[in-house]
Image (tube, rainbow, N blue to C red):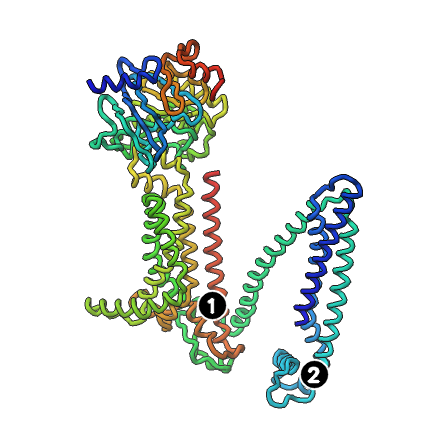
Amino acid sequence: MFSFFLLTGILIISLFFFLLGYNRAKNLINLNQKNLHSLTHYYGIFCSLSALLPTLGVFFIFTICDDLVFAELVKEYIPNEVINSKDYNFTIVLAQINNSVEGLIFGTPPQWVTNAAEIWKSWVIKSNILTMIVCAITILTSGFLSYKKIHSEFRSRNAVEKIVMTILAVSSVIAILTTIAIIFSVVFESIRFFALIPYDEFLFGTVWNPQFEGAERAGSGQEGLSQYGAIPLFAGTFLISIIALCVSVPIGLFSAIYLSEYASSKERAFFKPLLEVLAGIPTVVYGFFAALTVAPFLRSSGSMLGLDIASESALAAGLVMGIMIIPFISSLSDDVINAVPQSLRDAGYGLGSTKNETVMKIVLPAALPGVVASIILAVSRAVGETMIVVMAAGLAANLTANPLEAVTTVTSQIVTILVGDQEFESAKTLSAFALALTLIIITLGMNFYALHVVKKYREQYE
Amino acid sequence: MNSKKNDLKSLELTVGDVFSKNARLKARNVNVFYGENKAIDNVTIDIGNKEVISFIGPSGCGKSTFLRCFNRMNDTIDSCVIQGEITIDEENIYDKKIDVVPLRARIGMVFQKPNPFPKSIYDNVAYGPRIHGLSENKEHLDNIVEESLKRAGLWQEVSDRLSSPGTGLSGGQQQRLCIARAIAVSPEVILMDEPCSALDPIATAKIEELIHELGNEYSIVIVTHSMQQAARVSKRTAYFHLGKLIEVGKTKEIFTRPKHNQTEAYISGKIG
């Protein structure tokens, strides 16, 4: 609540600085009887932005840092016997104190927790006052300084340009930092996992069976109860992805060719959005389509042919996943094929090629790198897909190349491991992070390669 | 009898001699529509055997559109409708029986912007012979490629790097590669749509020289913006204005003694 009011105040003051800057520019024009370097509103924008941005920065630093500082300070108020006790965990203690601060009191907390919470509350008030004062000082000084900068020679248009550029740059840095942070959070948990389970067992083991995990695993001689060989999971992932590609690459590519080369503009305007609707269907819907429609159909038609198809099979999941990624391939390939210059087609027709020859021998080879890139992007989408597999392919970690059996994938295992209450100390829970890390590395590698291919393709026409 | 009358009708529009003694291509009363728009209005002209003829005229006068009628390149545009008759060796190319594929092999085309395929130099030239099955074996194909590149005046420059990409050549070399690609299928007529407009003067000079030489073996129709170029490369010139063929005649006469006042205005730079 406090933050909301403070932010509103900051915005109102910076609006006020806009008016100040604007009026000063107007006055300067009247005074000198001569136009300024930039239009008057640029002076206002400059003033308000240079008041607003530093203040926002200060505000966020304070609101993020105060909890961290309090957490450090509150340690002094935790009694020594608690700290020295066997199952002391600072995170839990901190959560207790925080709950008490927010009035969520379960049972009767110990006296020291209540005390610490009281002190914490007083800190919050102090820090709020401090934040307010610092923000006020920042906004007034920076606003006033920028106001002072405005004189007849000042180029506010260029200054605003620089400020805007900074905002854009900061936004992209935030996006990049988030990605890095996600990767690091996974990496740290994975390191903990690999401290329990050797990485070669994880990477090369052929049995995945984390069910009997308990705390006794580490060094207690109980080895062999649960096994963390990731190969069946990755094999399952690739089996399903390959089935998906067998469906989506021909259909996606051919429909892209039809849409870009053969369809009239009317047909194109009708079919292309229709294909892209496929991309808008939530994967969970595909999931029950696979589990409730496709899998039983496969099972019954298989039994007619004398084949024994599991009701949860890689085939069902792969087929439906293939349908799901058709729009990725068709839409991207369509764009790539359209990007092939018309002059190349003209050259082909001019030499007497038929339409098919032109497409196959000129347009597709020219578009091939882009098509390949779209397929690679679709693969990384297929590898990362979860819902369909969870619902249609089952959870049994079979190491098999038979598409008629149930398999499981990396992502669906991660889901089953992390759903519900978990102990964070057990190798079972941590294995989810190791799986995620391996998956991230694989998909990052594929995306990187796809971008590389696309770049190479662009160079051909420049 | 009827066609004679029609000829006269378009003769009312066109000044000069539209007919040719040994005509290869004949266009009779050709109208071209883009939807409602009439792009070519009742044009009649002959293109002689082994003759270089240039089409000149201001932008948008329909000269490129008319050129593309000869190898039916306008077929690819949905809204384009063509009326009238165009014959090659007395065969109507818009006849339903005519297959456009061999037709385009007989009538080659070179485009405004050099458009080599993103393949090797060799594959660029070999493309046409391959799809039309003109070569019996690899050796024969090699010969065709070499011969075509020689005729296009490119052999000396590229003989040592036939496998490098055609897109890596300079603009002028690319255009000569496109010419080599066109003559590799041994066409009878070559249509050139402003082949030098994207090239520098030196490359242009080379192409013009090449056109001059090729004129001994092929009928060449060249659309150009440059009147000097028309004067340099062609024996006959046709002047188009707003979809109408205004005047046809010997290049020398068109440029020195134009008969129609519109031609004169264009030549002297008043319109265009």
Quadrant for residue B10, please give it: top left
Q: Which residue is mark 2?
A: A78
Q: Nearer the viewer, residue A227 or A443?
A: A443
- Chain under callout 2: A
Quadrant placement of the N terminus of chain A? bottom right
Q: Which residue is mark 1?
A: A435
Q: Nearer the viewer, residue B218 or A38?
A: A38
Q: Position of residue A355 (x, y in %)?
A: 30, 39
Task: Answer few, some or many: residues within 10 Å of disc 2's Cα (few below 14, many 20 plus, some between 14 and 19).
Answer: some
Up/down of A100 relative to A320, above or below? below
**Mark 2, secondary structure of its residue:** loop
Task: Answer few, some or many: residues within 10 Å of disc 1's Cα (few below 14, many 20 plus, some between 14 and 19).
Answer: many
Q: Amino acid at mark 1?
A: Leu
Q: Amino acid at mark 2?
A: Ile
Q: Position of residue A230 (x, y in %)?
A: 43, 68
Horizontal side of A76 relative to A399 (left or right) equals right
Q: Position of residue A221 (x, y in %)?
A: 48, 81
- Chain under callout 1: A
Identified at 36% across, 15% down, the residue is B248
**Mark 1, secondary structure of its residue:** helix
Horizontal side of A392 relative to A163 (left or right) equals left
- For residue B145, say whether it is visible: no
Up/down of A212 relative to B46, above or below? below
